[in-house]
């Protein structure tokens, strides 16, 4: 296997295409899919040396696989992280960060606006093992400061957050975390490394659901953890090897190849999303449009300081409630009803009855999620067709 010798100094877009590539003796141009669980050795001394850690090389795909390694190396290069580890899903990545490093008595501070499953891990699973948590408004720096205890090990947030697209101030929150001796963990699934590199602002650990924009075509599950060598060697490596949230080499290969077009796709997602957001803001019956790069977003300046584009998700609220929102979903013809996001196909969901249905109405209200709210993951179709679809559906739903 050979690898590029000159990757030092390459820019992120070049690293997204070239980073981490390993070539076999055939000198293939495209990355190879190594669909294998095991590896054979020339002699018994070889596995002996590898198991002792004295020789590099693969032993078993739960421990490592060349295709998975290429995906990890490319992700680390793209995000500007020391190391990366891929997992079977975004939730496997999130839970591995916490479960590998926390023990009874530890404490976590997390932002309220959080992916539902992340909140379950923090509030329910960790609590069972004696790890306490404090949930704060991620946009309020004072709440982060006040939540710190001597046992605080992690700060955890998502920015932009689902579905209200609130922006958390990465630099300021990282500073508060570091002063408390805690690590800042950022879920970067909504922005992707093409639009936001949280480590540039002081984040210690970044997690991804590569199921979303990194795959980009709604095909395969995957997750990534980016961290430093110390966190990897002290906590993560042994946890991953022994508990086995291993990504399939096939899924890793899809996501590896998808990174080559991520920048291009994210530019188009952002352009289309802004066009849809601007269109919706002008429609009768739409009382609120949330998009990080629109001037009416309360944190537009912070969004522009941290992100190079507003992302592919637009959230809006209709006059009325669930009835009107469902009527709109029934009337759309091009956009699909789906709670997934980050697909080339535009997808729309009603957060109150899907992604955020487990919350009490009061908790939803606290997050600003109303019954008339809809979230669109704007895809790569022609934005004029998307706007026409929304226009005809709005006319039917809110005559
Ligand atoms: C989808 C998602 C996850 C979970 O990822 P899976 O790949 O579905 O396990 C976590 N965080 C955010 C922000 C997500 O959108």
Image: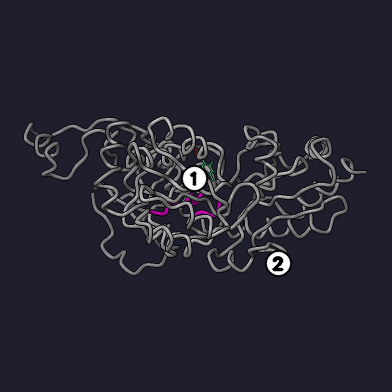
Indicate the colouring scheme: one colour
Residue drawn 55% across the image and 58% down it: 168
Label 2 SS: loop
* Quadrant position of residue 247: top left
Residue drawn 56% across the image and 43% down it: 217
Q: Which residues are magenta?
A: 183-192
> Which residue is at the front of the view, 291 or 222?
291
Outermost residue, right direction?
399
Residue denoted by label 1: 134
Dot placed on the residue nearer the N-terminal end, 1 or 2? 1
Residue 33 sits inside the magenta stretch: no
**Mark 1 or mark 2, whichever is nearer to me:** 1
Marks 1/2: CA–CA distance: 32 Å
Decide if residue 21 is on the left or right side of residue 134.
left
Residue 265 vertical position relative to residue 233 in the rendered view, above or below: below
Q: Is residue 365 visible?
A: yes
Residue denoted by label 2: 295
**Label 1: few (<14), some or many (≥20) within 10 Å?**
many
On the image, the x and y values in percent for residue 240 come to 31, 37
On the image, the x and y values in percent for residue 61 come to 29, 34
* Quadrant position of residue 340: top right
On the image, the x and y values in percent for residue 390 come to 80, 47
**Label 2: few (<14), some or many (≥20) within 10 Å?**
few
Residue 189 sits inside the magenta stretch: yes
Residue 205 vertical position relative to residue 9 in the rendered view, above or below: above
Decide if residue 253 is on the left or right side of residue 296.
left
Q: Is residue 78 visible?
A: no
Q: Quadrant of the C terminus?
A: top right
Label 1 SS: strand
């Amino acid at each position: 296997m050979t690898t590029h010798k000159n990757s030092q100094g390459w820019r992120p877009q070049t690293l997204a295409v070239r980073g981490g590539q390993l070539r076999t003796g055939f000198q293939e141009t495209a990355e190879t899919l190594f669909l294998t669980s095991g590896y054979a050795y020339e002699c018994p001394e070889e596995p002996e040396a590898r198991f002792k850690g004295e020789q590099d090389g693969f032993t078993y795909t739960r421990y490592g696989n060349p295709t998975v390694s290429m995906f990890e190396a490319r992700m680390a290069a793209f995000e500007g992280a020391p190391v990366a580890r891929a997992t079977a899903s975004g939730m496997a990545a999130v839970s591995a960060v916490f479960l590998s490093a926390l023990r009874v008595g530890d404490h976590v501070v997390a932002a309220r606006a959080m992916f539902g499953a992340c909140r379950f891990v923090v509030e329910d699973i960790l609590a069972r093992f004696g790890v306490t948590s404090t949930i704060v408004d991620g946009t309020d720096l004072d709440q982060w400061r006040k939540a710190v205890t001597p046992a605080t090990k992690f700060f955890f947030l998502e920015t932009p957050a689902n579905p209200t697209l609130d922006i958390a101030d990465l630099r300021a929150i990282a500073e508060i975390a570091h002063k408390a001796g805690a690590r800042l963990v950022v879920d970067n699934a909504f922005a992707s490394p093409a639009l936001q590199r949280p480590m540039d602002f002081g984040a210690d650990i970044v997690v991804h659901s590569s199921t979303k924009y990194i795959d980009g075509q709604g095909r395969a599950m995957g997750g990534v953890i980016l961290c430093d060598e110390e966190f990897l060697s002290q906590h993560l490596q042994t946890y991953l090897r022994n508990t086995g949230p291993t990504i399939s080499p096939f899924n890793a290969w899809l996501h590896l190849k998808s990174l080559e077009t991520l920048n291009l796709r994210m530019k188009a997602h952002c352009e289309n999303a802004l066009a849809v957001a601007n269109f919706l803001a002008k429609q009768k019956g739409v009382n609120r449009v949330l998009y990080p790069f629109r001037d009416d977003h309360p944190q537009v300046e912070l969004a522009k300081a941290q992100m190079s584009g507003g992302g592919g998700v637009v959230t809006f609220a209709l006059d009325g409630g669930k009835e009107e929102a469902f009527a709109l979903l029934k009337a759309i013809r091009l956009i699909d009803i789906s709670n997934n996001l980050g697909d080339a196909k535009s997808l729309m969901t009603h957060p109150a009855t899907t992604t955020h249905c487990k919350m009490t109405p009061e908790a939803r209200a606290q997050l600003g999620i109303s019954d008339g709210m809809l979230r669109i993951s704007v895809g790569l179709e022609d934005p004029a067709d998307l706007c026409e679809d929304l226009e005809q559906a709005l006319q039917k739903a809110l005559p």
